[in-house]
Amino acid sequence: MTAYWISTYKEIIDEAKLAAYAKLAGPALVGAGGTFLARGLPEQIYEAGELTRTVLIQFASVEQARSAHDSAEYQQALAALDGGAVRDLRIVPGAA
């Protein structure tokens, strides 16, 4: 079952660290089978929505998304981020 990696950036603390993270994270996640579907600021928000950077990545399964997160390549990206942002990251299974 398809799974979605959803990451929202509550606060960006260090732009340089975020750039270093992005340089490593994109290739690591694509290499692990992810497909970027959306990334950036919302064009419209409703209800209790927040104007925060959001990233949506599709994986073939929850297990594949977990493996991508736990991979050595992605862990290097997280090390580069090193507190440069406060994020909410979740993996959500697709609807059946």
Image: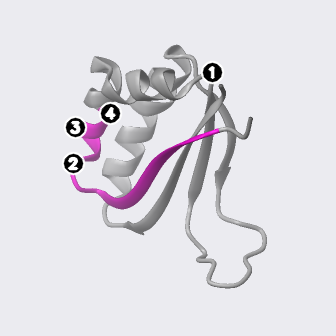
- Amino acid under disc 2: Asp
In the picture as drawn, the residue positioned furthest to the right comes out as 44
- Could you tell whether 68 is left or right of 46 in the image? left
In the picture as drawn, the residue positioned furthest to the bottom comes out as 47
Q: Nearer the viewer, mark 1 or mark 4?
A: 1
Asked whether disc 3 touches disc 2, contact meaning CB atoms under 8 Å apart, the reply is yes
Q: How many marks?
A: 4
- Amino acid under disc 1: Ala
Seen in the picture, residue 89 relative to 30 is either above or below; the reply is below
Per the image, the residue denoted by label 1 is 60
* Residues drawn in magenta: 77-93
> Which label's residue is closer to the chain start, 3 or 1?
1
Q: Neighbour class for label 1 at 10 Å: few (<14), some, many (≥20)? A: some
Q: CA distance from mark 3 to mark 4?
A: 5 Å
Per the image, the residue denoted by label 4 is 77
Per the image, the residue denoted by label 3 is 79
Q: CA distance from mark 3 to mark 2?
A: 5 Å
- Amino acid under disc 3: Ala
Q: Say which residue appears at 72% left-offset and 40% top-offset.
A: 95
Q: CA distance from mark 1 to mark 4?
A: 22 Å
- Could you tell whether 57 is left or right of 90 in the image? right
Q: Say which residue appears at 31% left-offset and 60% top-offset.
A: 14
